[in-house]
Image (tube, rainbow, N blue to C red):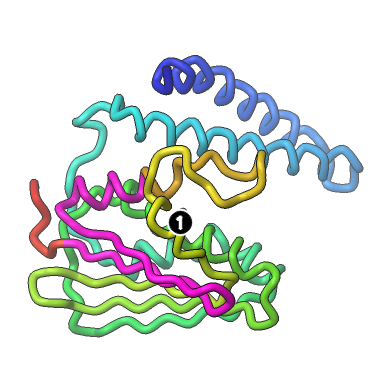
């Protein structure tokens, strides 16, 4: 059912995005409709992201769609932060990064791992919305035959009851209409498919920390 819904939605959503982008190109920035079109483009991209998560969850993406390649994890994060730069600046988020110079490039499916980091950082940004101190810290360092990535936030935290379920499909702590419950499940699947591990530590009112370990040599290349 999940795969069927995703495939049925994918083509019309892409068509809608193309139509919106066509209208944007032919609408002056001074036109009040331009901002409306930008909102429509953003929300359509969000829907397309949900569809992509559904496809990943259903495991119907072609196995040969992306190959393992050697890449720098800091470079992937740089792209993630570029994608989120507007929101980071708008919401006055203090972003700190600690990268060990000894961290090697590793074998990954780049877009899949980027999706994991984008989802986790996005969740962290949601978690700190109501916090006085809006901080997100990312550390990357070698750890034996793995690279260890830690994403920590100063947000609201996750209750012990919810913490044990966060990687379950369709489980979400977000209000109705604000989350599909697939994001962390997809992250878990992608990390596992790379031969890695993802864990979470959290404390209510203190914040949340995700630890992702990825093998340096990958599992296939």
Query: Is the residue 29 above or below the residue 3 in the image?
Result: below
Which residue is at a point 53% across and 39% down the rendered structure image? 180
Residue 82: image x %, image y %? 52, 63
Q: Nearer the viewer, residue 129 or 48?
A: 129
Q: Is residue 115 visible?
A: no
Q: Nearer the viewer, residue 141 or 30?
A: 141
Quarter residue 94 falls in: bottom right
- 16 with respect to 4 (left or right): right
- 185 with respect to 144 (left or right): right
Q: Nearer the viewer, residue 175 or 27?
A: 175
The N terminus sits in image quarter: top left
Residue at the far front in the pictured view: 161
Q: Is residue 120 visible?
A: yes
Query: Is the residue 139 above or below the residue 166 in the image?
Result: below
* Residue occupied by mark 1: 118
Q: How many numbered dots are placed on residues in this image?
A: 1
Quarter residue 15 falls in: top right
Magenta-colored stretch includes residue 56: no
Which residue is at a point 52% across and 47% down the rendered structure image? 172
Query: Is the residue 202 above or below the residue 178 in the image?
Result: below
Write down the region rendered in magenta. 186-214
Quarter residue 62 falls in: top left
Residue 40: image x %, image y %? 73, 36
**Local secondary structure at mark 1:** helix
Which residue is at a point 68% across and 38% down the rendered structure image? 41
Which residue is at a point 59% across and 38% down the rendered structure image? 45
Magenta-colored stretch includes residue 202: yes
């Amino acid at each position: 059912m999940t795969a069927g819904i995703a495939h049925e939605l994918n083509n019309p959503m892409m068509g809608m995005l193309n139509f919106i982008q066509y209208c944007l190109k032919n609408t002056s920035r001074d036109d009040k409709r331009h901002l409306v079109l930008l909102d429509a483009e953003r929300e359509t991209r969000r829907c397309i992201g949900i569809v992509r998560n559904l496809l990943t969850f259903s495991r119907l993406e072609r196995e040969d769609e992306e190959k393992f390649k050697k890449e720098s994890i800091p470079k992937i994060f740089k792209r993630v932060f570029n994608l989120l730069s507007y929101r980071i600046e708008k919401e006055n988020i203090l972003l700190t990064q600690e990268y060990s110079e000894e961290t090697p490039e590793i074998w990954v499916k780049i877009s899949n791992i980027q999706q994991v980091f984008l989802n986790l950082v996005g969740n962290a940004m949601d978690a700190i919305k109501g916090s006085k101190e809006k901080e997100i810290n990312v550390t990357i360092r070698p750890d034996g035959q793995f690279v260890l990535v830690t994403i920590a936030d100063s947000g609201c935290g996750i209750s012990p009851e919810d913490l044990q379920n966060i990687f379950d499909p369709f489980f979400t702590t977000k209000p109705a209409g604000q989350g599909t419950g697939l994001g962390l499940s997809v992250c878990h699947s992608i990390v596992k498919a790379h031969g890695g591990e993802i864990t979470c530590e959290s404390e209510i009112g203190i914040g949340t920390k995700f630890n992702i370990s990825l093998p340096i040599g990958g599992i296939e290349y």
